[in-house]
Structure formats: structure tokens, C-alpha cells
């Protein structure tokens, strides 16, 4: 079950919110837990046992750490947590990848088992590890009640697609929360913005990208030069709109019932450097690696060789976290190279405009590496983008895709910027001392979520329907 589906919107979420609103305060957490477990089990009931088991292990190790009478026992419990959770993540996510390399090198095993990847395992594994680490550091107290920790790890708002929520961010809200009407509205509005971003923009961009730069298709080799560039532009827009949309929806769902999850994206395509991009992109993942890997290794307060080693470890792990394939590892190390260049060569000497353009170019080609797991397809696209392909410079089909989607491109680019929030703040500023403007702003605020929800439902009903196709030159 995904957020952008009729089953979730019209059945699951509707029933959940009605029941949650009707039950007394003491029953709200049990209702939320039941809903979260049903939501998770929907995609694979057998994996619910894994989620509950990992949570039980983390609950146990955190209690051991908090009540241990020696540093050795505390450290042993922390090591045990990392071994159990990272071991399970390694088996389910990376065993096939490792066995494939071993098979290629030594011819064994004869057959690689097909291990199904549990939904959301990367997210809830990192969340639970961060919880136990924070208990070890004394930043939070261990949760004495198992089911409340399970509520944290299984919250359906974010257990599937993030953001990675720290326990210390929501510890107090698990026990005490009571959203105001304004917070409920802001949550609904944020959810509807994310839903529209996903259904109206991201899905349409994904369809255009799949048409121009299809994965696993012979058509990829015959694409025109302009087709490669345009297709990767659609993919660049889609991947931000997709990821940020799910974060918007998760933050909105949490806000509706009193949880305040931290922001996960801050308009990364407005970044003035590659380093700035990573301060704005998938913030919860970047901060996880910073706080639990980079800083414990020594961070930047060490010699230059140690700093480069620390960065290499972080960016190798960042790439590997995204998928069990060499292209993701290459993607992580690709960004490592440019981050080191910025630190040791560029050193902030570029004008802001050039830094922004340079960051966009680096990120754009980074998404080429990210999209294609097959190195043959990756090489085909890179060669084609620089005129060494078999499809020529342009084609009628590429021109058709561009003209049919020109308004989609324009709206998607705007959606990737802070222009919308800037205009909203400006409109609100204009209401001061003007009752008519204030009333008009209030009506606009009330109508916006309704319109976005309606448009999203229409887009879902139309499936592959692209509303922008009828607005062409």
C-alpha cells in the first residue's frame, strides 16, 4: 500500500482518522499502533515478524545499556545492536549482491537464492540503531514499554519511505501530544501538497523519462542525443518530486495527529555548491551518517589523510545504502570526488551563480549514474549524450514529447524551488491591516487542499493520463 493510492486514501486513511478521532486519548496510541502494523503487513505479513523482532532486540539492548553497571557491558550491548540489525540488513539487502560477485569470481555458489527485500528495512533499521546509539550517549532514556518502541519503529507515516525519524525527536510526543486545529489544517495541507506533487508531477515526469531513457530496452541505444538529455532532465525532476513528495506526506500525516517530524528536503536544486546540495537533500540520511559514522570516525578534526578516509567511508556507505549495485556505490564515490574538490581546490572561490550552475551539472550527471544499474546501459547513455550514439541529434518523437510536456517541465521546475512558499508569505504579508485581503487569503488557504486532493484523485483515476498534454504549443 502506498500513500498515492485509492486504497490508502479512501479506505485505510479515512477509517484510521475517523477511529483515531473518536477514541479517548488513552486509546489513541493503541489505535495508531494497530493501524501501523496493518499498513506494514499489507505489503508482506511475514516481514512484520522481522520488524517486531528488530524492535524487540533494540528494546532489549537499550534497556541493558541504561541499566548496565560498567562501560564494558554498555559497549557490548551497543555492539550487539549493530551486529544484529546490520547483519539482518546485510542478509536481506546485500547477500545476493555479494554472492553474485563471489559467483563471478570463483564460480560458486551454483545458484544465488532470491531473497525478497523487506519493505522499509533500511529506514527502520537506521531508526532503531540511532535510538540505541542515543541511549548509549545518554541523549534519551530507554523506552521501558516494548509496544511504544514498536509504535515508533512502525509508524506508518514514515516506516516505508522515510524520513529517518530520530527517537529523541518524537519521544515526548509518543507520550504527550494534542494537536491544535491549526496544526491539523497544516498537516492536511502539507499532505495534499505532497500528494499532488507525486500524482500530478512526479508520475508524469517518470512516464516521460521512461519513454525517453527506458531501462532494459533496446530502444535506449537508438535514442537521439536530445532525447537522452531531455529524458535525464525528466528523471532529475521526477526523483526529487517523488522523494520529497513522500516526505511531505509523512510530515503532513504526523502533523495531523501531533507529531512534528523534521524537514527532509530543503529545495536542494537551489544549492550553491555540491556540499550545499547535500545539506538540503535527504537531510535525515545525511545527518544520520554525519552523527553516527563521520563524527565518531573523527570528522574533519584530524589530519588530511584521515579526513579523506572518513569521507570515503561515509560516501561509500551512502551509495551502498541506496541499493545493492555497483552503480550506487559509484554514485556515492562520484559525489565524494566533487566534495573533496570543493574543499581542497575550489575552496568557496566560485561566485554564487557559477557555484549553483556547477552544482546542478554535477547533480544532473550524478542522476545518470543513479538511474542505470546496468553498466552497458549507463555507457550507452553517456556516449549518446555526447554525440557518440546511433540516434543522431534529434528526432520527431523527442520534439513531440517536449512539446506535449512543456508545461509539465515548467511547473515541475517551479515545484523544485521555494517560489511557492515565497509567494504564500508575500500574500500573507499583504493581508496586514486589510480585512478584504485577509478574507481572500483565508478562502485561498481553505480551498487549496481541497483542490489539490481533487486533482490528485482525478490523476489517480486516469492512471497514465497526463493533464499537461493538452496544453501544448
Image (tube, rainbow, N blue to C red):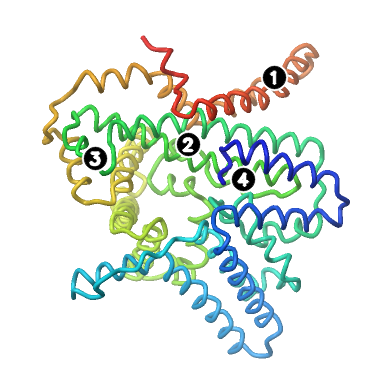
> Decide: marks 3, 4 in contact (CB < 8 A)?
no
Residue 277 in percent (x, y) is at 43, 45
* Horizontal side, residue 353 vs residue 180: left or right: left
Give how far across and how far down residue 61 sits, in percent.
Answer: 63, 79
Residue at (56%, 56%) from the top-left corner? 164
Classed neighbour count for the residue bearing mark 3: other residues with Cα under 10 Å, few (<14), some (14–19), many (≥20): few
Camera-side residue of 449 and 70? 449
- The circle drawn on residue 241 is 2
Q: Earlier in the sequence, mark 4 or mark 2?
A: 2
Q: Are marks 4 and 2 in contact (CB under 8 Å)?
A: no
The image shows residue 253 at horizontal and vertical percentages of 67, 43
Q: Which quadrant holds the C terminus?
A: top left
Report which residue position mark 4 lands on.
Answer: 250
Task: State the separation of the CA atoms marked 2 and 1.
Answer: 24 Å
Residue 7 falls left or right of residue 304: right
Q: Secondary structure at mark 1?
A: helix
Which mark is on residue 444?
1
Reading the chain from its start, which is encountered first: label 1 or label 3?
Answer: 3
Disc 1 from disc 3: Cα separation: 45 Å
The residues tagged by marks 4 and 1 sit, at their Cα atoms, a distance apart of 23 Å
**Mark number displayed over residue 217:** 3
Label 3: which secondary element: loop
Instruction: Find residue 319 and report its image quarter.
Output: bottom left
**Distance of label 3 from label 4 (alpha carbons):** 34 Å
Q: Secondary structure at mark 2?
A: helix
The single residue placed furthest to the right in the displayed view is 24
Quick one: 213 or 6, which is closer to the camera? 6
Can residue 69 be seen by looking at this rendering? Answer: yes
Secondary element at image label 4: helix
Select label 4 or label 1 by which is in front. Answer: 4
Amino acid at each position: 500500500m502506498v500513500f498515492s493510492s485509492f486504497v490508502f486514501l479512501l479506505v485505510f486513511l479515512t477509517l484510521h482518522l475517523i477511529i483515531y478521532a473518536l477514541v479517548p486519548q488513552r486509546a489513541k496510541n493503541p489505535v495508531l499502533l494497530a493501524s501501523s502494523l496493518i499498513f506494514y503487513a499489507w505489503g508482506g505479513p511475514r516481514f512484520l515478524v522481522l520488524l517486531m523482532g528488530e524492535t524487540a532486540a533494540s528494546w532489549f539492548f537499550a534497556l541493558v545499556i541504561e541499566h548496565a553497571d560498567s562501560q564494558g557491558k554498555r559497549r557490548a550491548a551497543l555492539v550487539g545492536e549493530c551486529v544484529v540489525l546490520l547483519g539482518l540488513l546485510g542478509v536481506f539487502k546485500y547477500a545476493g549482491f555479494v554472492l553474485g560477485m563471489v559467483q563471478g569470481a570463483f564460480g560458486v555458489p551454483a545458484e544465488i537464492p532470491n531473497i525478497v527485500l523487506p519493505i522499509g528495512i533500511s529506514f527502520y533499521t537506521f531508526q532503531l540503531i540511532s535510538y540505541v546509539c542515543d541511549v548509549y550517549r545518554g541523549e534519551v532514556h530507554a523506552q521501558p514499554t516494548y509496544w511504544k518502541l514498536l509504535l515508533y519503529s512502525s509508524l506508518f507515516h514514515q516506516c516505508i519511505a522515510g524520513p529517518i525519524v530520530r527517537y529523541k525527536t518524537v519521544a515526548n510526543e509518543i507520550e504527550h501530544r494534542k494537536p491544535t486545529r491549526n496544526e491539523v489544517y497544516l498537516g492536511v495541507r502539507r499532505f495534499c501538497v505532497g500528494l499532488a506533487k507525486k500524482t500530478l508531477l512526479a508520475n508524469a515526469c517518470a512516464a516521460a523519462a521512461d519513454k525517453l531513457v527506458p531501462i532494459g530496452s533496446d530502444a535506449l541505444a537508438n535514442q537521439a542525443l536530445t532525447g537522452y538529455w531531455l529524458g535525464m532532465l525528466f528523471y532529475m525532476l521526477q526523483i526529487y518530486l517523488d522523494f520529497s513528495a513522500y516526505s511531505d506526506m509523512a510530515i503532513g500525516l504526523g502533523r495531523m495527529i501531533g507529531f512534528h517530524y523534521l524537514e527532509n528536503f530543503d529545495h536542494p536544486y537551489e544549492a550553491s555548491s555540491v556540499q550545499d546540495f547535500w545539506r538540503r537533500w535527504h537531510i535525515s540520511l545525511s545527518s544520520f551518517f554525519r552523527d553516527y559514522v563521520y563524527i565518531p570516525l573523527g570528522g574533519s578534526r584530524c589530519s588530511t589523510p584521515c579526513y579523506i578516509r572518513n569521507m570515503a567511508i561515509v560516501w561509500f556507505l551512502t551509495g551502498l545504502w541506496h541499493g545493492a549495485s555497483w552503480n550506487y556505490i559509484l554514485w556515492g564515490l562520484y559525489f565524494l570526488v566533487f566534495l573533496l574538490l570543493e574543499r581542497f581546490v575550489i575552496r568557496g572561490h566560485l561566485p554564487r551563480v557559477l557555484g549553483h550552475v556547477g552544482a546542478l551539472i554535477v547533480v544532473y550527471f550524478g542522476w545518470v549514474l543513479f538511474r542505470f544499474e546496468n553498466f552497458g546501459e549507463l555507457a550507452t547513455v553517456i556516449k549518446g549524450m555526447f554525440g557518440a550514439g546511433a540516434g543522431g541529434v534529434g528526432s520527431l518523437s523527442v520534439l513531440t514529447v517536449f512539446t506535449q510536456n512543456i508545461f509539465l517541465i515548467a511547473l515541475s521546475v517551479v515545484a523544485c524551488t521555494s517560489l511557492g512558499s515565497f509567494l504564500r508569505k508575500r500574500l500573507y504579508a499583504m493581508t496586514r491591516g486589510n480585512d478584504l485581503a485577509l478574507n481572500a487569503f483565508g478562502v485561498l488557504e481553505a480551498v487549496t487542499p481541497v483542490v489539490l486532493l481533487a486533482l490528485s484523485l482525478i490523476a489517480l483515476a486516469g492512471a497514465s493520463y497526463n493533464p499537461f498534454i493538452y496544453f501544448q504549443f
